Image: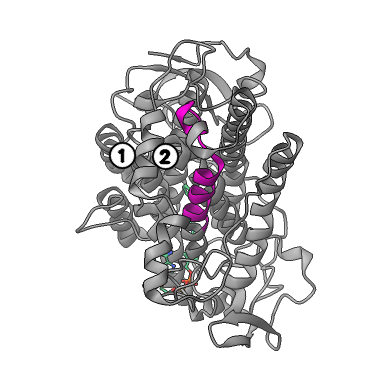
Amino acid sequence: MAIDYGECIPNNVNLSADRTLQRALEHWQPKFLRWWNEMGPTDFQRAEVYLRTAVSVDAQGWAQYGRVRMPEYRWGIFLAEPKPERRIPFGDHCGEPVWQQVPGEYRAMLRRLIVTQGDTEPASVEQQRALGHSCPSLYDLRNLFQVNVEEGRHLWAMVYLLHAYFGRDGREEAEALLERHSGDADNPRILSTFNEPIGDWLSFYCFTYFTDRDGKYQLKSLAESGFDPLSRTCRFMLTEEAHHMFVGETGIGRVVRRSLEVMKEIGSDDPARVRAHGAVDLPTLQKYLNFWCSSSLDLFGSEQSSNAAAGFAAGLKGRPDEEQYEDHVLAEASYEVDTPDGRKPVPMRNALNEVMRESYLKDCELGLRRWNRAIERAGVDFVLRLPSPRFRRAIGLWAGHTVTPEGTPIARDAYERRLYDWIPAPEDRAFVRSLMQRVTEPGRMAGWIAPPERGINNLPLDYEYVRL
Ligand code: BYC
């Protein structure tokens, strides 16, 4: 029977006319579905979820809402519209026409970037797979699943590039993306944060706040790529990424709001009493922020990186919003980097991971400012802070150095003694997990989180976002 490609795999890459690509995808799709059923959300495959699906890249088509069973979700392949006459915006080839095919000399580097990006997408679905069982509301359950299916689509986006542009080794890499698994002792995911368990919803909100924001910065830097199909793919992915960070920011904001309400009700900000009344105390929230922020900072790579320099020189990976800069070649420039031996100048191309990490941290500050304003308005004497980028690093110049969240170096034994003052101790995690009781009555929220300000797509809060 002929397959209607436009119907089962919505796309704007003319899939119905491309036999080679069809064959590759026909081979891969059943493996993807098997992976989704085995490693995707547990037990909710029959639920009808109010999801948005991208069926085209224009304003009407990129977010079509309706009830869908997740395994029947139409994972599509979309590239943002081409920019006519686009030129390579940075690096040694700056100003030359962009590439529509893989530049032979940079093939390996380009494949590595696409594989690393692609690997994070199914990884996050695996990390979040058990959360549905402890959802704080149907609204949140639906948001979790929306994030999951879109990470699935982002995997499709990278697999499309591997299949369409890399031939046989691209197809092998596409299979390997389904074979590595988050936290697997023998075959783990490539990047560190994507092997951390996400066992509770507070971790989920922190992950979508901090780790999805790394996604925003990495996608923005790949959207600048001289390899035009990658640039266009990432530009479209960024439209979906915004919702994931929204889930994180509003999720943490609602936890703060509920915590402040409980403090008001009991007339105390004593963390033990806040906990006893079923809310997350602010010191515990701070520990979660420290954990996920420090882990996500590692995702930018080392402060001084020959990979970053090579990717920039080749025109494959730029800086987010490259047009905001004047110098797009960076042959002479240098950048002062904070190292354990003091501030040191590093050739700018080698320092680009650090440049990006610093702008990322400024972006992370915005949410904290909002949460802190709510805390201040409630008259509570507590300020949430981001940890120093030196704290708890496993990648880069600060890896292996013991430093407090304020950035002060400290002896190893003192660091080890105090670590659980700064990141969640097993008993903090156990407490947070004890709050995670599933709530599935439309409109109702678990006691540890305030309701959101509005529903999805202008629907009321008590809409049945997931029919179980
Ligand atoms: N963990 O020169 P270095 C997202 C490796 S998130 C483990 O310091 P480089 C999403 C590195 O691979 C965005 N290994 O750094 C979010 C290299 O290994 P090789 C994902 C690490 O290469 C939420 C060696 O250390 N996208 O989309 O300049 C949900 C030396 O590396 C880590 C991308 O990351 C680490 N944290 O930068 C769903 C974009 N850090 O080559 C999705 C593509 C470094 O010596 N990736 N290493 O074997 C890249 O641009 C770069 O690979 C990195 C690293 C920015 C990650």
Q: Which numbered dot is residue 47?
A: none
Q: Residues within 10 Å of mark 2 (few under 14, many from 20)?
A: many
* Residue 447 percent coordinates (x, y): 50, 22
User: Tag 1, which secondary structure?
Assistant: helix
Three-letter code, disc 1 = Phe
Task: Point out the stretch of residues depicted in magenta.
Answer: 274-293
Image quarter for residue 117?
A: bottom left
Image quarter for residue 80?
A: top right
Q: Which residue is mark 2?
A: 152
Count of all numbered marks drawn on residues in the image: 2
Q: Nearer the viewer, residue 297 or 23?
A: 297
Q: Is there a contact, CB below 8 Å, between mark 1 and mark 2?
A: yes
In this view of the protein, can residue 330 be seen by the observer?
Answer: yes
Q: Residue 343, relative to residue 298: is it above or below?
A: below
Q: Is residue 132 left or right of residue 30?
A: right
* Residue 219 percent coordinates (x, y): 57, 55
Let me know if residue 288 is in the magenta part: yes
At x 62%, y 28%, the residue is 61
Q: Is residue 383 left or right of residue 166?
A: right
Quarter of the image with the C terminus in it: top left
Q: CA distance from mark 1 to mark 2?
A: 9 Å
Image quarter for residue 19?
A: top left
Q: Which numbered dot is residue 32?
A: 1
* Residue 59 percent coordinates (x, y): 69, 31
At x 63%, y 26%, the residue is 261
At x 52%, y 39%, the residue is 271
Quarter of the image with the N terminus in it: top left
User: Tag 2, which secondary structure?
Assistant: helix
Q: Main secondary structure of the magenta part?
A: helix
Indicate the quadrant of ligand 1 in the picture: bottom left
Q: Earlier in the sequence, mark 1 or mark 2?
A: 1
